[in-house]
Image: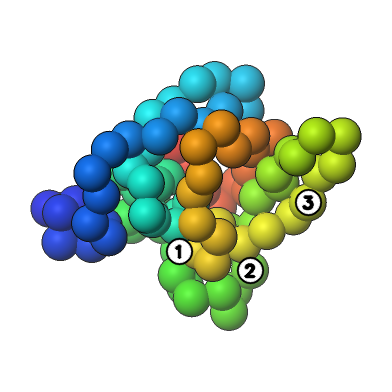
Amino acid sequence: MELGDILNPYDRLVEIDLLGEKREVPENNSLLRCFQFLSPDTVSYSDLCWNGTCMDCQVVVKNGDKEKAVLACRTDVAEGMEIVGMPAAIDLG
């Protein structure tokens, strides 16, 4: 699978905190596409709808003292984003 065919164009990688681990992912993409960038073999073939219907890609993002559940397929990545909860449906290997 060529990730260049599915990722939105990007100029740089941004750093996020993923369950306490610093990771670099492509800007201008949804979180789910970023997870696919990190683990193409597992995320690409997972049983997800990719459009928000199944709600199986819900992650928990921390912002200051607050946490918010969002759908990874409908939420764009941002520099410094902190993801503190991941669903079992997304296996990053």
Quarter of image, res 45:
bottom left
Q: Residues within 10 Å of mark 2 (few under 14, many from 20)?
A: some
Q: Secondary structure at mark 3?
A: strand
Name the residue located 54 percent from the left edge and 67 percent from the top edge: 74
Q: CA distance from mark 2 to mark 3?
A: 14 Å
Name the residue located 45 percent from the left edge and 70 percent from the top edge: 50
Quarter of image, res 32:
bottom left
Q: Secondary structure at mark 2?
A: loop
Describe residue 10's horizontal placement relative to residue 53 as left or right.
left
Q: Is residue 42 visible?
A: no
Q: What colour scheme does the image use?
A: rainbow
Marked residue nearer the N-terminal end (3 or 1): 1
Against 53, residue 10 (above or below) is above
* CB contact under 8 Å: marks 2 and 1: no
Against 20, residue 80 (above or below) is below
Q: CA distance from mark 2 to mark 1?
A: 11 Å
Name the residue located 87 percent from the left edge and 34 percent from the top edge: 65
Q: Which residue is mark 2?
A: 55
* Closer mark to the observer between disc 3 and disc 1: 3
Residue at far right of view: 65
Describe residue 20's horizontal placement relative to residue 78 as left or right.
right
**Amino acid at pointer 1:** Asp
* CB contact under 8 Å: marks 3 and 1: no
Task: Name the quarter where the C terminus is drawn.
Answer: top left
Marked residue nearer the N-terminal end (2 or 1): 1
Residue 9, position as x, y percentages in the image: 22, 56
Q: Is residue 3 visible?
A: yes
Q: Secondary structure at mark 1?
A: loop
Residue 30, position as x, y percentages in the image: 45, 57
**Amino acid at pointer 2:** Met
Name the residue located 42 percent from the left edge and 45 percent from the top edge: 35
Q: Which residue is mark 3?
A: 68
